[in-house]
Image (spheres, rainbow, N blue to C red):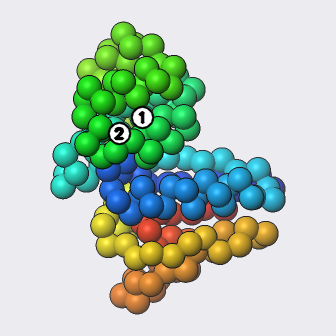
Amino acid sequence: MRRTGIATIVDFVDFECPFCRRFAPTLDAAIASAKVPVRLVRKMTPLKIHPHAMTAALAWCWAEAQGKGEAMAKALFAAPVDRLTPEGCEQIAVEVGCELETYRKTLADPATLERIKHDAADAKTAGSGACRRSSSALKGWAGPITIRRRWPQRSRARSEGFGELGHQLRI
């Protein structure tokens, strides 16, 4: 059921991806300037070419389950990529207020990895293109979110609400 005045943004994320890292402040600014309430749903899509992406995704899943997902996302995006190691993500988790023992248990829980697999499947179903992105910014927010897209071969995606940075936006 669609609620009037509520915008939901589904953001497919790889915390090591340079395009996702560049897009994060733009998305934050758009949400901050929104004229309607916004619900941000992050879907983890760590790419195999990014050696620390899975660790960061697992770390975010745990923090999100503890109510610290946004703080963790901001910290992971702000951290240098070489800090997204298991040790670095653990330190970041502590810095945002996560309990270390529970964090370690969650990382070892197969359900956390299964969640990431489901998120990646959602991205594939949605047509979110991994690493085939070009630069642009969110344009306006008064009504539905508008993101320009520069993939001529994927023109159908424009009408389906896919952002050019591989981020799907649903209003």
Q: Are marks 2 and 1 in contact (CB under 8 Å)?
A: yes
Q: Position of residue 76 (x, y in %)?
A: 42, 40
Report whether 86 appears left or right of 5.
left
Please tell me which residue lies in front, 66 or 75.
Answer: 75
Local SS, label 1: helix
Please tell me which residue lies in front, 165 or 5.
Answer: 165
Reply above or below: 159 against 115. below
Local SS, label 2: helix
Residue at position x 25%, y 42% in the image:
82
Report whether 127 appears left or right of 136.
left
Image disc number at residue 28: none
Q: How many marks?
A: 2
Residue at position x 36%, y 10% in the image:
101
Please tell me which residue lies in front, 98 or 147.
Answer: 98
Q: Identity of the amino acid at label 2?
A: Ala
Q: Position of residue 84 (x, y in %)?
A: 30, 38
Label 2, residues with CA under 10 Å away: few <14, some 14-19, many ≥20: many
Specify the quadrant that holds the C terminus.
Answer: bottom right
Reply above or below: 124 against 53. below
Q: Identity of the amino acid at label 1?
A: Trp
Residue at the disc numbered 1 = 60
Report whether 161 appears left or right of 140.
left
Q: Is residue 44 visible?
A: no
Residue at position x 41%, y 58% in the image:
20
Q: Is residue 66 visible?
A: yes
Residue at the disc numbered 2 = 57
Disc 2 to disc 1, C-alpha distance: 5 Å
Label 1, residues with CA under 10 Å away: few <14, some 14-19, many ≥20: many
Residue at position x 48%, y 61% in the image:
23
